[in-house]
Image (tube, rainbow, N blue to C red):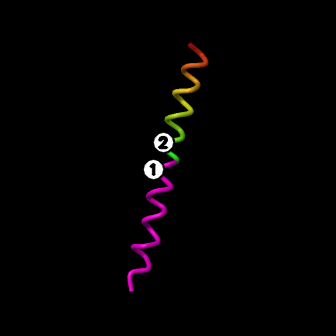
Amino acid sequence: MNINASDAEPDRKAARLERQVARTEKALAAVKAG
């Protein structure tokens, strides 16, 4: 059974989404500051 592999996949996607959100928030902050 491959439970560990399928469990890790959503975690990787979530981590990538979190990085994307953080980058977007930084960009928005830069726009507001500028």
For disc 2, the marked residue is 20
**Mark identifier at residue 4:** none
C-alpha span from label 2 to label 1: 6 Å
Residue shown at the point (47%, 71%) measured from the top left: 7
In percent of width and height, residue 10 lies at 48, 63
The relative height of residue 3 versus residue 15 in the rendered view (above or below) is: below
Q: What crowding class fits label 1: few (fewer than 14 Cα within 10 Å), some (14-19), or many (20 or more)?
A: few
Position of the C terminus by quadrant: top right
In percent of width and height, residue 16 lies at 45, 50
In percent of width and height, residue 8 lies at 44, 67
Please tell me whether mark 2 sits on a helix, a strand or a loop.
Answer: helix
Magenta-highlighted residues: 1-17
Residue shown at the point (61%, 19%) measured from the top left: 32
- State how many labels appear: 2
Looking at the rendering, which quadrant does residue 9 occupy? bottom left
Q: Is residue 18 left or right of residue 32?
A: left
Please tell me whether mark 1 sits on a helix, a strand or a loop.
Answer: helix
**Mark identifier at residue 16:** 1
Marks 2/1 in contact by CB < 8 Å: the verdict is yes
In percent of width and height, residue 14 lies at 50, 55
Predominant SS of the magenta segment: helix
Membership of 8 in magenta stretch: yes
The relative height of residue 12 versus residue 20 in the rendered view (above or below) is: below
